[in-house]
Amino acid sequence: MSYISQSAGYWFLLIFGIAMFAITFIFARWKKWHTRDGFLVANRQVGWFVGSTSIAASWIWAPALFVSVQLAYQKGLAGIFWFTFPNIVALAIFAFLAPRIRNLLPEGYTLPQYINYRLQSDKVHKIYLVPYFFYQIMAVTVQLFAGGSLVSLLTGIPLTTVMPILAAIALVYTIVSGLEASVVTDFVQLSMIFVIGLIILPMTWIAAGGSSAIFAGFSGIEGIDNIFDPGVAFSLGIVTSIGLIAGAISDQQYWQRAFAIKKNYLVKSFIIGAFLFGIVPIALSSLGFIAANADMNIVLPEGVDVSMIGVQTVATLLPFWAVFLFVIMLLSGLSSTLDSGLSAASSLWVTDIKKLASDNEAIKSARIAMFGITIVGLAIAYAVYYIPQLGLFHLWWIFNTIAACVVVPTILSLYWNRLDARGVFWGVLVAFVVGLPLFVYGNIIEKPIWIVGSSLFIIIVSTLFCVLMPRKNVWNPADYSTSSS
């Protein structure tokens, strides 16, 4: 069942795309389009206000908009707690990491570039690029799949048609000025999320019957009454916490902002960004609680992923125009991460693969990389469409687990001067080759002990190799020129 006609859906996508392009064209500073620093790190002049909104908006992606509601719906307060708390920590931790990397590599662009400078190892640099590129590809894939599912559910436009349209929209306006375009549109998109949320959510609460309807669903459909339920803490809490924190640390989007925001504003930007982000999943979780209330009779259409339960709640309780606004709100969140992923991938390509210093060559190569990453992400989104067993939730877990393979070496590289390339290489390699297949297998057989055990194995093994294979001498930044990176 669709709630908006297909023709209205196409018009909506066209207007949304034109609006994002116009905002970028008007507000992105033109002089920055023509320099490498301008395109990749906005000339390192992003202020705290725009910086914090960009940090929050780029972290408000499909999991925050859909998985948060799904967990509230399934596991109640326990589910939303174990989703939101680690998410906030994942961003807040950059209040420590971002100033540190700016001190060590002031003119840097990417985390893998820093790793190459820090460890002086092409082998480690290459193995690091695997999770960092993969994370951006998956960011594009998940946004396209979730956004396409959303529009398809509400308009009846086939998912296979919607996904390339969403990809084209983000690509067109991000190509204009790179990170500058992403930061500017992030501010606008976050504003739309908050303004529309302040309209739609209270309307939904009232239509459902008020606070009593929300409270009735606090246990979720699984009837979990304890917010600190040991079973949820073990099966969901551990894996989610590892995955989210590792995901942020292994996401070039936030290192790119760490290099772009003015140095003295880094701590303020990431703390405020974490706070702004937290508001969104907490507020949206109310939709999951309402759907979990049996008296509401909210049922998903057959074949629709359970992560769409929040959308179904709004579509069931509110009129057409309100649903239309809600779609704008959700697409704003998805687009903010989609364009951030394209920009982050382009910085990895220019800095770590092509290693271009010339302004014209760097910008041209960055734009080509954006196009390439869009095609790859779209292709994987189509693959996911034809493998219905692989839902949004499992896809999110898998690429966060890949990110976990490098999280400990990354933190150690910033704070431990005995870290050696050998330990990093073997630790990450074993985590990839052994830990990741175990995690995937655990999800296939749906055994929490396997899932949790494999996640902990990845963290432990990558740590042990680093600690047991230290440098013989203490690393001194003065011994290495940043130009060698």
Image (tube, rainbow, N blue to C red):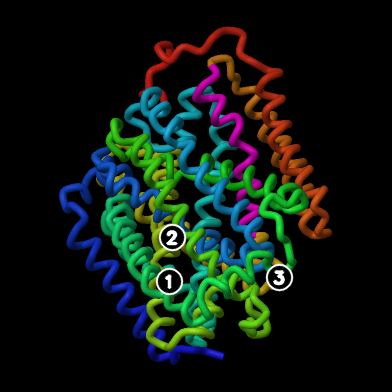
Nearest the camera: 354 or 351?
351
Q: Amino acid at mark 1?
A: Leu
Magenta-colored span: 395-416
| Residue 451 picture location, percent across and down | 77, 49
Distance in Å between CA atoms under marks 2 and 1? 9 Å
Q: Say which residue appears at 38% left-offset and 89% top-offset.
A: 8
Q: Residue beneath label 1, please?
A: 166
Q: In the rendered structure, which disc, 1 or 3, sits on the residue that comes first in sequence?
A: 1
Location of residue 465 in the rendering, given as x and y in whole percent from the top left corner: 70, 24
Q: Secondary structure at mark 2?
A: helix
> Residue 136: where, in percent of width, then height?
50, 52
Q: Secondary structure at mark 1?
A: helix
- Give me the residue at 60% from left, 44% from top: 403
Circle 3 residues within 10 Å: few <14, some 14–19, many ≥20: some
Is residue 469 rendered to the left or right of residue 161?
Answer: right
Prevalent SS, magenta region? helix
* Residue in view at x 57 percent, y 67 percent: 381
Mark 2, residue position = 338
Q: Are marks 1 and 3 in contact (CB under 8 Å)?
A: no
Residue at (41% x, 33% y) in the render: 98
Crowd band around label 2 with a 10 angstrom C-alpha radius: few (<14), some (14–19), many (20+): many
Dot 2 or dot 1, earlier in sequence: 1
Dot label at residue 221: 3
Residue type highlighted by circle 3: Ile
Up-down: is 192 above or below 238?
A: below
Q: Nearer the viewer, residue 189 or 365?
A: 189
- Are the residues tagged 2 and 1 within 8 Å (C-beta)? yes
- Residue 239 counted in the magenta span: no
Quarter of the image for the N terminus: give it: bottom right
> Which mark is in front, 1 or 3?
3
Give the crowd class for mark 1: few <14, some 14-19, many >=20 residues within 10 Å.
many
